[in-house]
Amino acid sequence: MAILEALKQLRRESWLQDCRIWLYRGAWQEWDIEEVDMAVPLSPEESRIKRMAIFKHQSQKDRPLFPGTDPREFWQRAEERNNKTAIQYDKLGMAEYQAMELFVRYHFE
C-alpha cells in the first residue's frame, strides 16, 4: 500500500513519533476481534451520520466498481458489517450498541 510505504519513509521524522496511526478496513472486511486495538461504539444517530457521510463521498455513494458477488451499495455493506461487529461484542459480554467500528494500531517496523 502506498500509505504504508510513505509511513515507512517518514518513520524517522520527529513529528511522527507522537502520532498514533489507526488502520481501518472498508465495507468488505473486518478485523478479527483478537487483532483489535480500539473498538468505537456507534449509536443509531452516529450510524445515520456515517451513512450520510458515505453518501457525500463520490467514490462510495453508488454501486462499487468491483462488488464481487455482493450487489449491495457501499453504505449497505458498511452498515451491516458495523452492526454484525456490535453483535459479536455483545455476545462477548460487552455493552450492547447499534454498531461498532474496529481499528488496529499501526506500529513501525
Image: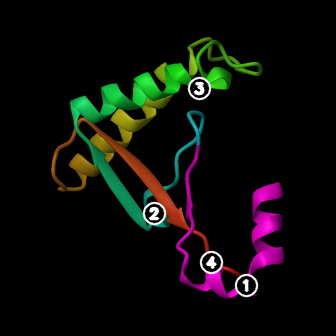
Task: Between label 1 and label 4, give the one nearer the viewer.
Answer: 1
The amino acid type found where label 3 is placed reads: His
Q: Could you give the CA–CA distance between mark 4 and mark 2, rounded to whole angstroms?
A: 13 Å
Q: Is residue 37 magenta?
A: no
The amino acid type found where label 1 is placed reads: Glu
Pinpoint residue 28: horizontal percent, then vertical percent: 60, 34
Q: Could you give the CA–CA distance between mark 1 and mark 4, rounded to whole angstroms?
A: 15 Å
User: In the figure, is residue 94 to the left or right of 46?
Assistant: left
- Residue 38 shows up from this direction: yes
Identity of the residue drawn at 55% across and 76% down: 19
Q: Quadrant of residue 108?
A: bottom right
Residue position for label 4: 107
Q: Earlier in the sequence, mark 4 or mark 3?
A: 3
Q: Earlier in the sequence, mark 3 or mark 2?
A: 2
Q: Earlier in the sequence, mark 4 or mark 2?
A: 2
Q: Residues within 10 Å of mark 2 (few under 14, many from 20)?
A: some
Task: Between label 4 and label 3, give the one nearer the viewer.
Answer: 3
The reply to whether discs 1 and 2 touch (Cβ–Cβ < 8 Å) is no
In the rendered image, the vertical position of residue 16 relative to residue 6, given as above or below = below
- Residue 1 shows up from this direction: no
In the rendered image, the vertical position of residue 91 relative to residue 63, given as above or below = below
Q: Which residues are magenta?
A: 2-25
Q: Quadrant of residue 23?
A: bottom right
Identity of the residue drawn at 67% across and 88% down: 14
Q: Earlier in the sequence, mark 3 or mark 1?
A: 1
Residues 81 and 15: in front is: 15
Q: Could you give the CA–CA distance between mark 3 and mark 1, rounded to whole angstroms?
A: 31 Å
